[in-house]
Image: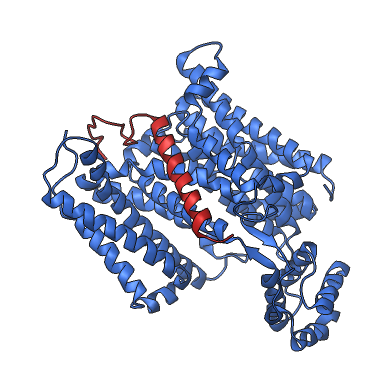
Amino acid sequence: MIYSQKTPATLILGIVFAAYGWAVKQGLLDGMLAYLGQTKNADEMVAIALTAGIVGIIAGIVQLFATAREGNFDYYLSTIAGALFILLVAAVVKWQFAPLVAILSKAMGTVGGTGKPIHKLLGLNYVVLGILSGIIIVNYFKIPSWAENGVRLSRLGLKTGVILLGALYSIAELAKLGQLSVVMIGFFVLGSVGMVLFIGARRHIPNSMGGVLSAGMGVCGVSATVAAAPVVQAKSTEIAYTIGTILLWGVLMMFIFPPLGHALGMGPVQFGAWAGTGILNSAQVAGAALAFQPDGIETLKVAEIFNITRVLFLPIIVLWLAVWYVKRESGAQTVNVGKVIVGKFPVFVLGFILVFALSSTGIFAPANHYKGKYFDNSNVSAKKMLSDGDVATLQAQVDKVQREDRTAALSRLMENRKVMSIDDDDTLRGLVNAKVLDKGANKILKKAHKAVRHTAKRVKKFRQLIVWFFAFGLVGLGMQITFASIKQAGGQPLFIGTIVGATKAVGALIVILLFVQETI
Amino acid sequence: MAEPKYDRGSALSIFKSDRAEDFVALLIALVLVAVVVMFIPK
């Protein structure tokens, strides 16, 4: 079978990418990039567009002028056009569409008392917009035949993204986790997975749907869904349905949790633990925590600790689902776990563990980093230290600060001209969020914060790569989803997701009110 | 998308098995890790 087609599409895509990269490099698009807030991504655009352009032009010329012969070369060559097609859609979404949505959303102001624009609340970022774009293309415009083979590369992109995700975490963070967070999260993660599987079986949804939904509802949203999908042989529609259920649930909870937390008189630790346990998507956990405590970051810190703990359970859940799926599909009463691990456990999840282990050795960033950010005040240059004028500005407003911890941190900052500890840094960030001081003083505090908080360059690069692999994979995933397949999936997953999500939220609330005090 | 007839891989993947796809993903990831470590300062 000959796969590659004699089409000019690959060459045209290559020329489009190359032209875009060249235009950005020459500064021809500076005005547009500035308007979209994308100037910081110019280097990334040049690198990706020129690379894709060169690949497309070479592959396009070969496809057009060489005689195709059946074999590996023809097979893999035929995927390049589709891969470039997905990449083009992903690039438009990430560089133009998502920033434009953000600009329009911000122009509409904030929603209610949340202090956030609508795109933040609805999570309209490249993840959602990428899947939606893919769905629109396949249902309204049809995938061109020359691109069909390349669309089958999207899952490879998602798997590579999950493996690289391990670079954002390290064992040092886990050492800081409280025992309570591990026990609580473990209980609710395993409980949610078990509950989805139980209800799913009762309501006769396919095992693949139940399996992937349980991982998404139990662990941590999109990444867990992607990681568990191959183990239970989930279809693209089932993956998208799970992601949709998680995001919808998260949006709803982001509105409900904060006022309920205030009504119940919860403190930052209690609310952070509740949001970190009950809300499934990381961005929405952060949104709820900040909505609960806009004038500080204590809640956010606790919520993040609970949130990160969930990732630990990912390999355990994947193993559980692998055994469960084999059992359900084969109808066997007992399953040889060792055999399942050897035969079914996804190598890419082991890859995630391997990269996580590498990250823990400190080769990507200092061992105490969190997602690539770390505190270091040992080498603050004279230019970045507070000036006499800065100190005078802060001194003039010190009386406005009521909380003792904030006054003390501010005094140490003024005395030493730089932030002296990670705790002081957190306290002063809370002070900025609280908007107690005027804009000028807050600007000085932000400058002091930037001087001691560093982003590890390697982790930053990994984050960029992960975003691209996910954008590529999710656009391709969307291109495999037809309206008919969504209709076929029916409303059961949403129903089950709602029951399990509500049970988890209420259960976590009860446990927290009974056992979690204001300190962990 | 109408499911095309492929004599290699499946409707979701160009690879002959999930495991083959996993190994390719792992290979790509490890190459990227090596490139990042070699060319980007800590």
Q: Tell me: residue A17, above or below residue A390.
A: above
Q: Give the farthest residue toward the top.
A: A333
Q: Is residue A370 visible?
A: yes
Task: Identify the residue at horizontal 47%, vertical 34% (top origin).
Answer: A229
| Residue A424 locus on image (x, y percent) | 79, 66
**Quarter where residue A459 is shown:** bottom right
**Numbered circles on residues, count:** 0
Q: What residue do we see at 75% from left, 79% from top?
A: A437
- Residue at point 20%, 57% (across, down): A11
Above or below A330: residue B9? below
Of A118 and A27, which appears nearest the observer?
A: A27
Instruction: Kindly identify the residue that appears in the image at 45 percent across and 49 percent down.
Output: A470
Q: Quadrant of residue A238?
A: top left
Question: Which one of the lettered chains is coloured blue?
Answer: A
User: In this image, A362 relative to A339: left or right?
Assistant: right
Quadrant for the N terminus of chain A, please.
top left
| Residue A289 appears left or right of A162 | right
Residue A126, percent across and down? Answer: 45, 56
Can you name the residue that lies furthest to the front here? B38
Instruction: Report the side of A444 relative to A461 (left or right).
Output: right
Query: Viewer-proximal residue, A222 or A87?
Result: A87
Image location (x, y in percent) of residue A269? 78, 51
**What letter labels the chain drawn in red?**
B
